[in-house]
Each structure stands twice: as structure tokens, then as C-alpha cells.
Amino acid sequence: MRIVKMVAIASVVALGACRQNTTADESAANDFAMNDVLVDNGAANMTNVAASDIDTTFVTDALKGDNGEVAIGNLAAVQASSQAAKDFGRTLATDHGAHKQKLLALASAAGIPATDEPSDEAKTNLEKLKALKGADFDKEFKRMMVEDHEKDIAKYEKQASAGDPQTSALAKETLPTLKKHLETAKSL
């Protein structure tokens, strides 16, 4: 039974990989399709997956990280002065929003409480960015996103090699996107 559950969760992760770089409409359609597949694969019964089988700290921290990236990305999309920073903000909000949906499916299956709270660091960064305008905003946004994505990549690389099967697979799938975000942030 545990193998069936792991296969079902792996299916969610694999489906998520197919969703990279989609439009908002395609992403919404894929969300519905992914939910249908979950039900078809019996994931409705996945509530029996023990939270002890999944690294709950990683899932909770990753959810908070995604919440922070979405909030900061949305702020940058409006408040940044350069078009590149605005576009990157939208990319962050979209990509981290999609990643959060994958985490929520995993959390739900394991009975891990969902959170809409950003990490404490993201809260601090968000407040700092709200007070900045123009080139000052762009410079600080770039610095924060480079630093944040370097930390995230280190965490996800560790999880990919040493985590439980579910979070390890998710971390491996997520690393290319995080690395792309880091390169984009450096280029701002």
C-alpha cells in the first residue's frame, strides 16, 4: 500500500514537471487536470500517508518560502522600476505559486497543516522592499533574490539527496527552476 501511495505522489510530481513555463490559463487547466488524476489514482485515500513518512519540516518551510516568493514577486511586478525586474517578479509569483500547489498536495496527503504565512525572513524582506522605490528597489530586490535562491538551492540539493522519497523527488524536480531564478536574479 505504501508503494502505491508513493507512486501516486510521484505522479503528482511528474505532472507538475510538465507544467513548467505555462500560461496562467494553461496552469489553471493543468491544476484541474492534476486534481482529476489524483482522484483517478486513488489519491483521495492518500490521507493515510503518515506525516512521519514525509519530512514535515521541509514541506512547511518550503510552503512558507513559496508564500514569501509569491508576495515579493507580486510586489516587484508592481513596484520595480525596470521591466526586467517586473517580469522576474511575475515569474517568481507564477513559478512559486505552482510549486506551492505541489507542496499542498503532498501536505494534504500526509496530513501536514497548510500555511499561507511567509517565512520570517520573507516578512522582513517584504517590509524592507515596500519602503523602497525606483532603482533602490530594483537593487535590493536583486540582492535579496540572489541570496534567497542561493540558500534555497542549497536546501533543495540537500533534500534531493537525503530526504524522504516524496520530498526528494520534489526537490530534484524543483532545482532547475530555482537555478534559473538565481541566474535571472543575477542578470538584473
Image: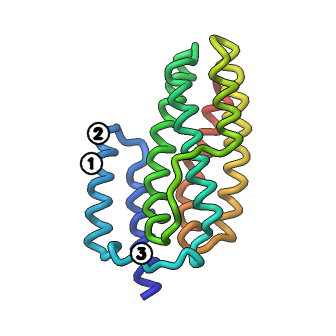
**Location of mark 2 (residue):** 25
| Residue 52: image location, x then y, percent | 59, 77
Q: Quadrant of the C terminus?
A: top right
Between the residue at mark 1 and the residue at mark 2, the CA separation in whole angstroms equals: 6 Å
Between the residue at mark 3 and the residue at mark 2, the CA separation in whole angstroms equals: 29 Å
Residue at image coords 50%, 20%: 78
Q: Which residue reaches farthest top?
A: 134
SS type, badge 1: helix
Between the residue at mark 3 and the residue at mark 1, the CA separation in whole angstroms equals: 24 Å
Q: Give the number of the disc on residue 29.
A: 1
| Residue 66: image location, x then y, percent | 56, 46
Q: Quadrant of residue 4?
A: bottom left
Vertical arrangement, residue 139 with respect to residue 59, above or below: above
**Location of mark 3 (residue):** 47
Report the coloring of the rendering. rainbow
Q: Quadrant of residue 88?
A: top right
Depth order, front residue of 20/101: 101
Q: Is tag 3's residue or tag 1's residue first in the polypeptide sequence?
A: 1
The amino acid on which the numbered mark 2 sits, given as a three-letter code, is: Asp
Q: Residues within 10 Å of mark 2 (few under 14, many from 20)?
A: few
SS type, badge 2: helix
SS type, badge 3: helix
Residue at image coords 71%, 62%: 158
| Residue 138: image location, x then y, percent | 65, 19
Depth order, front residue of 21/64: 64
Residue at image coords 69%, 32%: 125
Q: Quadrant of the N terminus?
A: bottom left
Q: Is label 3 or label 2 in front?
A: 3
Residues under numbered marks 1 and 2 in contact, where contact means CB atoms less than 8 Å apart? yes
